[in-house]
Image (cartoon, helix red, strand yellow):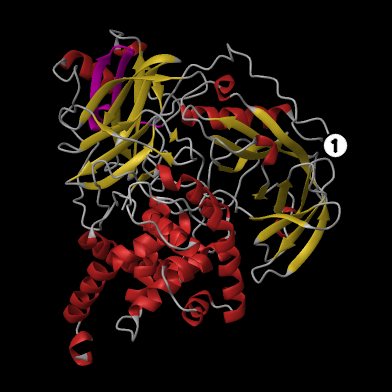
């Protein structure tokens, strides 16, 4: 049998059977470990990928479970923004309190409790999965169960009720794990996704041997942030989208011309001759007019061509009915011949969205990010009418920018997801930003530029003005630079989403620019005064060494917390810091994983994971080409 399984086809079939049989249980476990659908499914896919790399193995279920538990208890997992489809999968009314109590457990305590109580594993098996001593796991599981029992409620629809509190807790966790969830992938798609991940990993390993890849994330001015660990990414599955490797390549930015003016030869000839502004254009005869049309918000034409083997192009935009010579060039970001492009005309307020994709592609639009009352974060996409791969649809935008995201699928597979390109006339704010007074004591005057950037960074993805967030400045401070020009301020701002959740964001910056360190979304029932925020903020400043002035630990806590212990992966105390003026900012100690706040008597108050620097901006807009 082992000889047969070492054949590629035999291994593939055996692994596919394993996925079909064991993946549902792994998903249920992951849902209890994480509390959200998208992160749970991503962790399971990573666990299955690790299992497949060592296939065949003596105990693949143990291998998958160990990878799952390791991923769920890794640094920052519980504190980071999650992307899932509403409603919250842990949303059964009778188990609401239990779901909240489960989320409040520290990651290692939560994992021990799930394995011992919900999964029914013995202490030795749970300890082996967690890589911790049996006694430690037993104590953690007992502590977790003790915290959860008061929140476990009897099922009002069940005639025979559990005889003991422990059985009631097991039943409640079972209901949470079995909550109806629409997963992004079915078993066959999960197997294909594992294959894609394994192939991508081999390619990355080979490429890394020859090329050092640098990933740049946008920032304003001289402040930039280096690439962080990518968060678990998942796109809401309505309809289901498979991002497998076999998406058919298709030219997108080619002729013949599409759009409402495609049959106007005089206008097309004039557009082909139009000036491209500061961009060197190919000869007019070598240019292609991809799109030309009028919208309720203006006229636009997309013209492309090649100069010295470099593909380039420009939008030409202006009022509806304007002649070609009156149109103004606007350079689309990230242009490529096979990549869909977007353009938002008009706004602030009513606008028109133009999407140019491949012929036959499906175009879907999400009008804004949704954050539900429990802190779940999602985008819902709606298919729009398209002709020859072009969609022109009504849209809206605030004066700070659009909340829109566009998703393009081809043959049922995701090929592109991104924010929209808005040239936008921004002459200055017409609505003043709200003035925020710090909730907690601060030692310095808050930096108005950083606070303003935080407000706008929260408001834009949610599709509201900053005042609509009912914002509060939780705390502000400064980064303790060892050298360099000026100071770098940090601000922690709290808003309320239209869906009722809290949205907590940390930003840093100074005279050279501003950047987002990350955003979390606690449930709306969480009192703002009770929030404890622990965040890594990484800033790369010109002239400063990364090791000396690169990463800081930002902590703010309620008034009863007078100090904080910085904990490593094993729970060892790395540092003890006073909380002066409502918070502290210190260089990030190596190996930091969690922080524990202490009261004046030195008694522990709360332990929370330190969230890493965000890898992507808040908003789940998408990063462009997929797959």
Query: Is any atom of residue 545 visible in this view?
Result: no
Determine whether 599 is above or below 337 in the image.
below
Determine whether 507 is above or below 330 in the image.
below
| 321 and 520: which is toward the camera | 520
Determine whether 614 is above or below 253 in the image.
below
Q: Position of residue 607 (x, y in %)?
A: 67, 56
Span highlighted in magenta in the image: 280-302
* Residue at the spot 25% in from the left edge and 47% down from the top edge: 241
| 112 and 501: which is toward the camera | 112
Q: Residue 68 vs residue 293: left or right? A: right
Q: Where is residue 369 in the image (x, y as percent from the top left)?
A: 43, 33
* Residue at the spot 53% in from the left edge and 27% down from the top edge: 459
User: For the N terminus, which image quadrant?
Assistant: bottom left
* Residue at the spot 40% in from the left edge and 66% down from the top edge: 204
Residue 292 in magenta? Answer: yes
| Residue holding disc 1 | 443
């Amino acid at each position: 049998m082992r000889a047969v399984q070492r054949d590629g086809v035999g291994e593939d079939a055996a692994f596919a059977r394993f996925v079909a049989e064991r993946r549902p249980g792994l998903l249920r476990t992951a849902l209890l470990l994480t509390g959200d659908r998208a992160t749970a499914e991503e962790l399971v896919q990573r666990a299955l990928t690790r299992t497949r790399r060592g296939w065949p193995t003596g105990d693949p279920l143990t291998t998958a479970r160990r990878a799952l538990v390791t991923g769920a208890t890794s640094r920052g997992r519980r504190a980071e923004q999650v992307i899932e489809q509403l409603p919250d999968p842990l949303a059964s009314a009778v188990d609401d309190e239990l779901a909240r109590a489960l989320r409040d457990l520290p990651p290692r305590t939560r994992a021990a409790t799930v394995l011992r109580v919900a999964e029914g594993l013995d202490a030795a098996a749970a300890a082996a999965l967690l890589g911790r001593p049996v006694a430690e796991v037993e104590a953690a599981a007992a502590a977790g169960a003790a915290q959860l029992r008061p929140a476990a409620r009897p099922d009002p629809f069940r005639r025979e009720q559990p005889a003991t509190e422990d059985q009631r807790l097991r039943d409640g966790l079972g209901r949470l794990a079995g909550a109806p969830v629409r997963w992004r992938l079915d078993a066959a798609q999960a197997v294909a996704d594992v294959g894609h991940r394994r192939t991508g990993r081999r390619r990355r390993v080979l490429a890394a041997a020859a090329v050092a890849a640098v990933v740049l994330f946008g920032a304003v001015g001289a402040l930039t942030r280096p690439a962080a660990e990518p968060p678990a990414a998942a796109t809401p599955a309505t309809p289901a989208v498979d991002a497998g490797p076999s998406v058919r390549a298709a030219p997108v930015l080619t002729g013949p011309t599409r759009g409402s003016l495609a049959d106007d030869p005089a206008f097309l000839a004039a557009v082909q001759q139009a000036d491209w502004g500061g961009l060197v254009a190919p000869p007019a005869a070598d240019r292609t007019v991809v799109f030309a049309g009028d919208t309720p918000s203006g006229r636009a034409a997309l013209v492309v061509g090649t100069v010295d083997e470099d593909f380039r192009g420009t939008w030409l935009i202006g009022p509806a009915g304007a002649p070609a010579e009156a149109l103004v060039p606007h350079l689309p970001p990230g242009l490529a011949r096979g990549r869909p492009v977007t353009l938002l005309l008009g706004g602030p307020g009513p606008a028109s969205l133009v999407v140019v994709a491949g012929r036959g592609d499906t175009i879907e639009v999400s009008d804004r990010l949704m954050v539900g009352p429990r802190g779940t974060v999602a985008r819902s996409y709606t298919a729009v009418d398209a002709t020859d791969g072009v969609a022109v649809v009504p849209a809206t935008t605030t004066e700070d920018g659009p909340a829109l995201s566009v998703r393009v699928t081809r043959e049922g597979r995701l090929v592109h997801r991104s924010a929209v390109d808005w040239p936008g006339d921004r002459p200055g704010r017409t609505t003043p930003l709200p003035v925020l007074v710090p909730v907690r004591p601060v030692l310095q005057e808050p930096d108005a530029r950083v606070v303003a950037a935080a407000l706008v960074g929260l408001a834009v993805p949610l599709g509201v003005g900053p005042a609509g967030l009912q914002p509060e400045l939780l705390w502000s401070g400064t980064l303790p630079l060892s050298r360099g020009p000026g100071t770098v301020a940090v601000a922690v701002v709290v808003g309320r989403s239209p869906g009722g959740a809290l949205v907590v964001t940390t930003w840093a910056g100074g005279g050279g620019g501003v950047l987002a360190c990350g955003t979390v979304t606690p449930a709306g029932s969480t009192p703002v005064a009770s929030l404890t925020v622990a965040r890594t903020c990484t800033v790369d400043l010109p002239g400063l060494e990364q090791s000396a002035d690169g990463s800081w630990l930002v902590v703010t806590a309620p008034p009863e917390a007078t100090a904080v212990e910085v904990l490593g992966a094993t729970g060892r105390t790395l540092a003890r810091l006073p909380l002066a003026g409502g918070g502290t900012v210190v260089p990030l100690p190596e190996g930091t994983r969690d922080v524990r706040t202490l009261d004046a008597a030195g008694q522990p108050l709360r332990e929370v994971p330190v969230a890493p620097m965000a890898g992507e901006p808040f908003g789940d807009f998408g990063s462009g080409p997929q797959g």
